[in-house]
Image: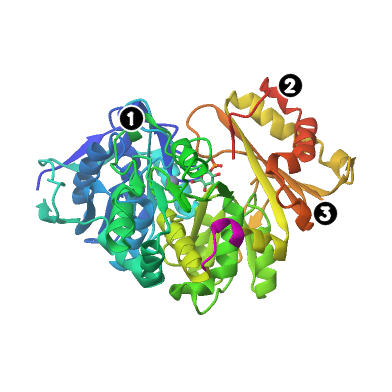
Amino acid sequence: MDIRTVNTQPFPDQKPGTSGLRKKVPAFQQPHYLENFVQSIFDSIAAPQNATLALGGDGRYYNREAIQIILKMAAANGFGKVLVGQGGILSTPAASCVIRKYQTYGGIILSASHNPGGPDGDFGIKYNSSNGGPATETVTETIFAKSKTISTYRILDAADVALDATGNFTLGDMQVEVIDPVSDYAELMESLFDFAAIRSLLAGGFRIKFDAMHAVNGPYAKEILERRLGAATGSVINAVPLEDFGGGHPDPNLTYAHELVEICYGENAPDFGAASDGDGDRNMILGKRFFVTPSDSLALLAANATLAPGYKQGLAGIARSMPTSAAADRVAQALNIPCYETPTGWKFFGNLLDAGKVTLCGEESFGTGSSHVREKDGLWAVLFWLNIVAARKQSVESIVSEHWAKYGRNFYSRYDYEGLPTEAAQGVMQHLKDNFAKLDGAQFGKYSVKFCDDFSYTDPVDGSVSKGQGVRIIFTDGSRIIFRLSGTGTEGATLRVYLEAYEADVSRHHLDAQVALAELIGIALQISELKSRTGREQPTVIT
Ligand code: G1P
Ligand code: ZN
């Protein structure tokens, strides 16, 4: 074996964020940049000799090159086997599925999720542990620490592995098994949902559109929705994964999935629409001219979970990220099960899922998932919804309206101010924190502040504490304004403002969320001094 030990120098900026290390492609293309981070992973995870690793990515620009480098480094670092998706492809939930099913030591996922791709776009890498979930903060901190002192990395001198057909190869002393990226995942979905019921729903004329946004879920959706469930050919649009996502922004929300939105709000709209993101873990659910907020979607899935075979025993509990609306809390209360409030980021759900404390979890950022894997799962959410619609034989809109009538409606919206100068964004956060004492108990129109704080979380399983997770202004009626700085951006700072107002009165449930939240939005702008501090009149994205 021709293993080379290469001298290198640390890069100071390899701190993993909310979901792994994300940078612009040219940053990753710097000599040694990817190699340093991969070696820092290997030096942190203490894998035994001959361990197995799963490897795959969302197919974005630089995915193929990165896969080859990582394979050669794995071979030089004593791994016995790597399971890699054909073409270097694995959606994030499929990677989690593969890690769990084949009980690998862990996995490396290449993705910058919903961020645009291409030569000037974003790239990302993260490590997932043997439970199939993103490494805990303890592990990511170790990786970061190693990256700051690294002086060498190991790599095998060898030819590239052919990734375009499934099969077994050797790379030095290591085996490489190129696996079908879809089949294990599709099998898992069949075990959870009533495929026969969904098949007959679709055969009965229920029309769906799934927008894969030229991202990784195209082949998954084609196989599952069209081939296995019989949706009409063409139900999956933008189904061919492209390295730059066709120039689009593969984020399934009302702004970026506009092609789907136009179809679902247009003439002859289908009964159901859905989209997923770059790496297939996010989802957006639409009915006919109707949008389901992700926070409501989590609550709805929880309330109807027993209709799906995989969840017919009921739920152990629900978890939601702090900024996600409290709609799920109301369902948990009715079901008499616990509801956990975690910091933003999927990694905080892992311990709760592993300990069997929760079955479903979700985030307002179009992420929903369950104990079936340890990532959020876009197509899973779509299938869950189809299962519920098939069982209830009602439209998406009437299912949601009935839910609101029973539990009340949590009006919800998120305002993103992207690409801000870092100091200005931090200034807004600091200003809010400096004013906690003044805000406490203050009255704004019909809203009075119950309390405000900087959210801190103590993991109920391992006792670890995560501080500084977002400023919360909570009002006496349960309405909330949350301010947070994004941990996934690659340019400047992104400030997120989350707004939530609870409405019990059914006669007001049909209101547009922006109308219902108008007063809260005004309060948020006033107390944060956001406009004057950032010079921004409008958010860049509203979801
Ligand atoms: C964003 C979302 C968060 C999600 C993460 C990864 O992180 O807000 O809910 O877990 O992407 O998909 P943020 O940029 O806010 O740190
Ligand atoms: Zn994603």
Of badges 3 and 2, the one in the foreground is 3
Q: Is residue 438 magenta?
A: no
Could you give the CA–CA distance between mark 3 and mark 2, rounded to whole angstroms? 29 Å
Give the mark, 3 or 1, whose residue is nearer the N terminus: 1
Which quadrant, please, contains the C terminus?
A: top right
Task: Say which residue label 1 marks.
Answer: 118
Q: Position of residue 57 (x, y in %)?
A: 31, 46
Task: Say which residue label 3 marks.
Answer: 477
Colour treatment of the image: rainbow
Up/down of 355 relative to 512, above or below: below
The answer to whether one can see residue 104 in this image is no
Give the mark, 2 or 1, whose residue is nearer the N terminus: 1
Task: Say which residue label 2 marks.
Answer: 532
Q: Is residue 397 magenta?
A: yes
Q: Which residues are magenta?
A: 393-399
Q: Looking at numbered disc 1 in the image, what kind of residue is underneath it?
A: Gly
Residue 64: assigned label: none
Give the mark, 3 or 2, whose residue is nearer the N terminus: 3
Q: Secondary structure at mark 2?
A: helix
Up/down of 218 relative to 182, above or below: above
Q: Position of residue 293 (x, y in %)?
A: 59, 50
- Corner quadrant of residue 485: top right
Up/down of 55 relative to 120, above or below: below
Q: Position of residue 508 (x, y in %)?
A: 77, 51
Q: Position of residue 150 (x, y in %)?
A: 35, 39
Q: Looking at numbered disc 2 in the image, what kind of residue is underneath it?
A: Ser
